Amino acid sequence: MFAFFVRRFAQAALVMFIISILAFSIQDNLGDPLREMVGQSVSEAERQELRGKMGLNDPFFVQYWRFLKKAVQGDLGTSYFFKRPALDVILDKLPATLELVFGASLIIIFFSVPIGVFAAIQPKHWFSKFAMAVSTVGISVPVFLTAIMSIYIFSVELGWLPSFGRGDTVHVFGSWTTGFLTRDGLLHLILPCISLSSIMLPLFIRLIRAEMMEVLESEYVKFAWAKGLAPRRVWFVHALKNTLLPVITVGGVQIGTLIAFTILTETVFQWPGMGFLFLEAVNRVDTPLIIAYLIVVGLIFVVTNTVVDLVYGLVNPTVKLARPHGGDG
Amino acid sequence: MTTGTKLQRLLDSAFYHDFRRDKVAIASFIILCIYVVACYTAPLIAPYNPYDPTIIDIMDSEIPPAWLDGGDSRFLLGTDAQGRDLFSTILYGTRISLTIGICAVVLQAFLGISLGLISGYFGGRVDNFLMRLADIQLSFSTLMVAIIVLAVFQALFGTELYERLAILMLILVIGIAEWPQYARTVRASVLAEKKKEYVDAVRVIGLRPMRIMFRHILPNTLSPILVISTVQVANAIVSEAALSFLGLGMPVTQPSLGSLINSGFEFIFSGSWWITIIPGVVLILLVLVMNLLGDFLRDVLNPKLYKN
């Protein structure tokens, strides 16, 4: 078990190292920090002197080491546009993005489990067939199109829901702002959360149905039936438990994908989150902000993946601890 | 002679039999064929050339489809914000989307199959290293990687140069980001095939590993490759559309379906819904029929794809 933990942490550290190298080489190649600081009016000789002073002429790894030391202390440079530390700018927008992901996850959990389980228990029922047909179509609709179409229907044509921004937010614990506590904030959350969940929901319904159907065929479920247990107990206590194990793994990995899709959702809904900020930073060639986003999102990916693997290793007694990924793909 | 017998064999096969009984698969296949034919003969059937600025008149902009009030019989599906005929632009756009999707998947397949074969055939350290790499790459979402890479390149090249290289960049990024899908599938099949006697036999004959891998093992791993390919093309088209929608893909002057949707987005607030919604529906239908065909292939050929 201990070896498994160590191996998993080593992998996480390696991935973060690669991300930091990438981030640094982007910083090294993209834009000239000197020009951003002093403008065009400084002579070439002064420039060279300043470059020397700032250490821009040092070898790659010397500069990288300096970058890393600062990064570990939370200093990822100052945003050219906002004139504030890039990490602060990103972290200010983090609550908006996380609330979006949270809302979408709630929708996914509350709809996918009942629908998936029902479709597995009653595969011939009209509702199951309907749900499967809808999820096949749903899997083919890109997130940004769901978002655009929901805006067109519910905001432009019907005028029921707002189409952009977060609405009213309130401060909770210090700097965290939330839209979950005001009516206006909740109204603003509805469409973005539905759009964001629209790509994962069909995926999870299909996954839960497939896993559940397989579990229902297994020997121990047949044994539970033979014991004469009530159907509810067999379905929800015996079968569902083992269905959820693989679903949790997939779910953990999909949180990362969900964050990628926030870029699309936030762009459509002008949602003031990290993804929207990132695209603006790209258009302004705001290198420190691009790097800060890369590192923050990379960290979220690595942490969620590591935690999911560790939890899975703890929960599932059959996982091969010595070589967690050495099996057939 | 040979083509005749091959055709006969196909018609007699269980595969064709299953296909003929599956109405959804037939309909999907027909629609996909219409798409392919229509978009690759676009210069012949499109009424206008959307790339020719001399025939575009800004006075024609935002005309609704012909069957609506204010529609113009010259423009069947209306015009976009620049006055281009939407029908022609969609045909050309679908051609770009489909081309990028197919080329990206060819690249994925090439990388994935080669690395998967090497990984499965040689095993040991090479295998460990490649599969760990695949794990890491898959743990990051393809879209995320593509967005960041393209964003950085766009900032690095400047918009003008980037727009000229957009097709190539999209193919490269989507192609490279998804190789683990193929590599894992191929590796799993190779591991199963490697234990069989015919592989021992050719090894005893003394053939070189390259020949064994490509001429003897690869043909036996083709059906899972075929199954994931349909779905991968659909995924690549969606990725391309998403990237173009974010302004990181095809420029508005040479739009794919995604950039067309993007260019029309701001106009839905003023009521010109068709610029966005019609290309959107075209995109959804294309992806849907590919996914349905992928489902059909998976059910019929039934490789153990989703079971590790």
Image (spheres, coloured by chain):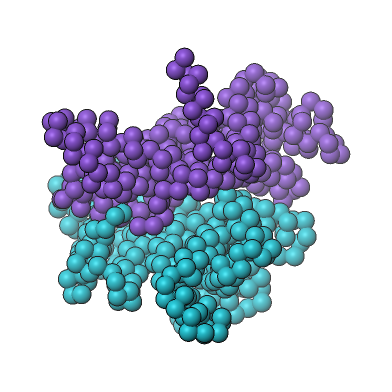
Chain colours: A cyan, B purple
Residue B104's spot in the image, x, y percent?
Answer: 42, 36
Image quadrant where residue B168 sits: top left
Camera-nearest residue between A155 and B116:
B116
Task: Using residue A276 as the reference point, say whether residue A138 is left or right of it.
Answer: right
Q: Residue at x 20, y 53 (%)?
A: B128
Image quadrant where residue A323 sits: bottom left
Camera-nearest residue between B287 and A246:
A246
Image quadrant where residue A294 sits: bottom left
Residue B11's spot in the image, x, y percent?
Answer: 54, 30
Residue B240's spot in the image, x, y percent?
Answer: 50, 41
Q: Residue at x 48, y 52 (%)?
A: A280
Q: Is residue A48 visible?
A: no
Residue B179's spot in the image, x, y percent?
Answer: 35, 44
Q: Residue at x 24, y 58 (%)?
A: A326
Camera-nearest residue between B121 and B6:
B6
Does B129 appear above or below B221?
below
Q: Residue at x 26, y 52 (%)?
A: B131
Task: Using residue B98 as the reference point, say whether residue A287 is left or right of it.
Answer: left
Task: Using residue B76 as the reference point, say whether residue A271 is left or right of it.
Answer: left
Camera-nearest residue between B235 and A182:
B235
Q: Is residue B65 visible?
A: yes
- Quick one: quadrant of the C terminus of chain B? bottom left
Does A311 appear above or below B144?
below
